[in-house]
């Protein structure tokens, strides 16, 4: 079985205009939603083999909460910052393990979630968690066919 979990970073703070986009932190809502959504994913019994995150502060902070909840270290990858859907999927597949969490940004997250859900997911709000499951154990096969199932969980 192959599982891919897409997590859009939690709500970020736009209060300091002097900060580079890459360095924006989470706002209060983001700091509330990220640990809650991480706990909800862990509560489903999901077990991650790897967590990949964009290097942007808001994404890596969000990923940190998921890493704590799932007991898995976060692997930060600069290429996930602003990555298109194809790269997000490829990054998960290249990791070569059965269950991967990818924490990154829109529009790539919404595009990939929409593609994998055959249009069932029209938007990934901040801190949304989309889970995709394939019966295949091989990422090459899994990424060539539609997932067997998918779910979307949002903080609101």
Image (cartoon, rainbow, N blue to C red):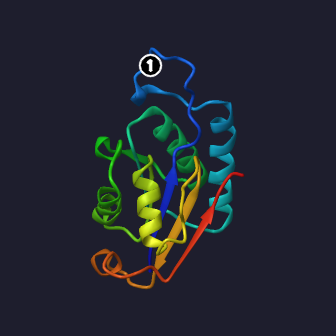
- Which quadrant would residue 27 be assigned to in this image? top right
Which residue is at 49% across, 76% downward? 133
Circle 1 packing at 10 Å, graded few (<14), some (14-19), many (20+), is few
- Which quadrant would residue 2 be assigned to in this image? bottom left
Name the element at disc 1: loop
Q: Pick whichever, 68 or 16, lies toward us.
A: 16
Location of residue 146 in the rendering, given as x and y in whole percent from the top left corner: 41, 81
Which residue is at 45% across, 14% downward? 18
Total count of labels: 1
Q: Which residue lies furthest to the top in this view?
A: 18
Location of residue 124 in the rendering, given as x and y in whole percent from the top left corner: 54, 55
- Which quadrant would residue 10 be assigned to in this image? top right
Q: Pick whichever, 49 or 79, lies toward us.
A: 79
The residue under label 1 is: 19
Location of residue 118 in the rendering, given as x and y in whole percent from the top left corner: 46, 75
Task: Identify whether 36 is placed above or below 98.
Answer: above
Task: Identify whether 117 is placed above or below 135.
Answer: above
Which residue is at 50% across, 45% downward? 63
Q: Tell me the quarter of the image containing the N terminus.
A: bottom left
Q: Which residue lies furthest to the right in this view?
A: 156
On screen, residue 98 versus residue 63, left or right, reads left
On screen, residue 146 versus residue 154, left or right, reads left
Q: Pick whichever, 20 or 5, lies toward us.
A: 20
Location of residue 103 in the rendering, given as x and y in whole percent from the top left corner: 46, 50
């Amino acid at each position: 079985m192959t599982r891919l979990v897409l997590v859009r970073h939690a709500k970020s703070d736009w209060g300091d205009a002097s900060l580079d986009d890459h360095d924006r932190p989470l706002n209060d809502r983001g700091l509330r939603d990220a640990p809650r959504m991480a706990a909800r994913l862990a509560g489903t019994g999901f077990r991650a083999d790897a967590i990949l995150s964009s290097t942007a502060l808001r994404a890596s902070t969000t990923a940190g909460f998921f890493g704590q909840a799932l007991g898995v270290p976060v692997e930060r990858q600069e290429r996930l910052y602003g990555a298109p859907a194809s790269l997000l999927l490829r990054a998960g597949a290249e990791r070569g393990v059965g269950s991967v969490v990818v924490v990154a940004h829109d529009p790539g997250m919404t595009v990939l979630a929409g593609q994998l859900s055959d249009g069932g997911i029209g938007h990934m709000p901040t801190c949304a968690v989309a889970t995709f499951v394939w019966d295949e154990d091989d990422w090459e096969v899994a990424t060539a066919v539609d997932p067997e199932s998918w779910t979307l969980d949002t903080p609101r």
